Image (cartoon, helix red, strand yellow):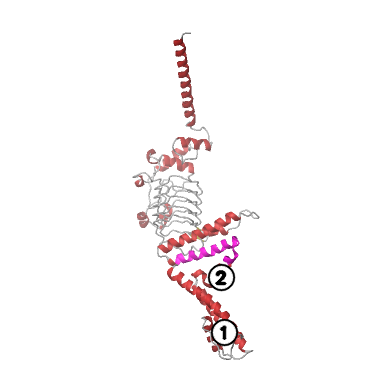
Amino acid sequence: MSEQDGAQSSTKQRRSRKTSIANQQINKQARSVQRPANDDTEAWKAYWIEQGQEWRTEPEIDAERQAFLTERRSITPSIEHGIYPFKDIKLSRADVEWLLITHENGRGPVDWDTGGQWKRDGLDLRGADLRQANLFGLPLARMRGGLTLKESREATDEQRSLAAVHLQEAILYTAQLQGAILTFAQLQNADLRHAQLQNANLYGARLPNADLRMTDLDHATLDYVTFSDQVYGCTCFADIKWGEVNLALVDWGPVTRLGDERVARQEQEHPGTRFPTIRDDQYREAVRANRQLAVVLRAQGLNEEADHFAYRAHMLQRVVLRRQRKFGRYLFSGFLDLLAGYGYRPLRSVIAYLLIILSFTGLYLLNAHFVAPHLRWDEALVLSVSSFHGRGFFTQDITLGDTYARLAAVEAVAGLLIEISFIATFTQRFFGK
């Protein structure tokens, strides 16, 4: 074989190898984007990632279900008659994923972060049944789950109720709900942790026992929202991003204890098993939730409501101290609570003042039965008041070693502690320090 023929043969072999490698890559790519032939969830997840739809996790619904949802979507809504495309229809995550990707003739879900898209209408899910649905991480921006404020003002209570979406016990963890209309929505027990609810309208929504930890509520409408009731308990509030949200029209009366505190205090799921580290973290989170809410409320002029949650934070912090075995600080904290309610219960200081005055008055009268001078009740009262404030005075017959003097010294110390609590109460109550 000539040198030229050898070179040509070598070139052909290299080209052949390159062609083979290219074909393998093409075949591999074709296999990687091939639609799964079964309901293998993991295979579908990989397929959706290849399609640039990372938020999809479920196998695509069959043709029959697609036809049904298409037919329902064509229904013209009527507020007057309570008619909506998916009213009372039980929707799964797979249904919602398909509705999102085919929204507006295939335009897809609203992308809140893309300029101009915030003006688009999201899915119309008014009256839909999404109880216990797993909607984790779905792009539901601008979703319609209730009437707009303008529509609500003109509608009856029944019409508003019929339009409200049902999301009880739904998982909306990290869901994108920016600009969503959720007026009067039923969100009891819903998991909304890390959800994006900026500019969302939750007017009149019911959120008892919902988990709002680390949720972004900037510029959301929370007017007349229900955060707590006797059936479900209260919402969890730790680390919420409140931003520019108005809390003045929320009825805080039923919110006696935050859901974060209930979680920390609840019994272990498995009796006999202890998770002290987890429980300590839960108590610290409950302390933080109460303090954060108190700060936000006080900033909006809701001082009485803020005082309630600030006081709950102190009480929970005392539990943390006990669990950390810091008994000195724990006992001192309990003393401050008993004496003045950490400055939020000024009446306790008044009661403590009267109890000490009357108690020492009785001790002075009791002592007067045994030693001279013998005091009348009004004289004992004057001695008690003056001793309490460190201004005790005695007759020439009484020496510093007498029982009267010793009792007066003890009362003076107790009086000093009470006066300090008065100062703390005044400062806390009227200056919020």
Q: Is mark 1 on a helix, strand or loop?
A: helix
Q: Which amino acid does label 2 sit on?
A: Phe
Q: Is residue 181 left or right of residue 62?
A: left
The CA distance from mark 1 to mark 2 is 23 Å
Query: Which residue appears at 48% of the width and 20% of the height?
Result: 17
Q: Assign a secondary structure to mark 2.
A: helix
Closer to us: 27 or 317: 317
Relative horizontal placement of residue 123, taking residue 24 as reference (left or right): left
Q: Residue furthest right?
A: 272
- Disc 1: which residue: 361
Residue at numbered disc 2: 335
Q: Where is residue 72 in the image (x, y as percent from the top left)?
A: 42, 43
The residue shown at (46%, 35%) is 50
In the image, residue 155 lies in the stretch drawn in magenta: no
Q: What residue span does the magenta drawing correspond to? A: 304-330
The quarter of the picture where the C terminus appears is bottom left
> Around disc 1, counting alpha carbons within 10 Å, would you say few (fewer than 14), some (14 to 19), or many (20 or more)?
many
Disc with the residue nearer the chain's start (1 vs 2): 2
Q: Which of 141 and 90 is in front in this view?
A: 141
Q: What residue type is labelled 1?
A: Thr
Q: Main secondary structure of the magenta part?
A: helix
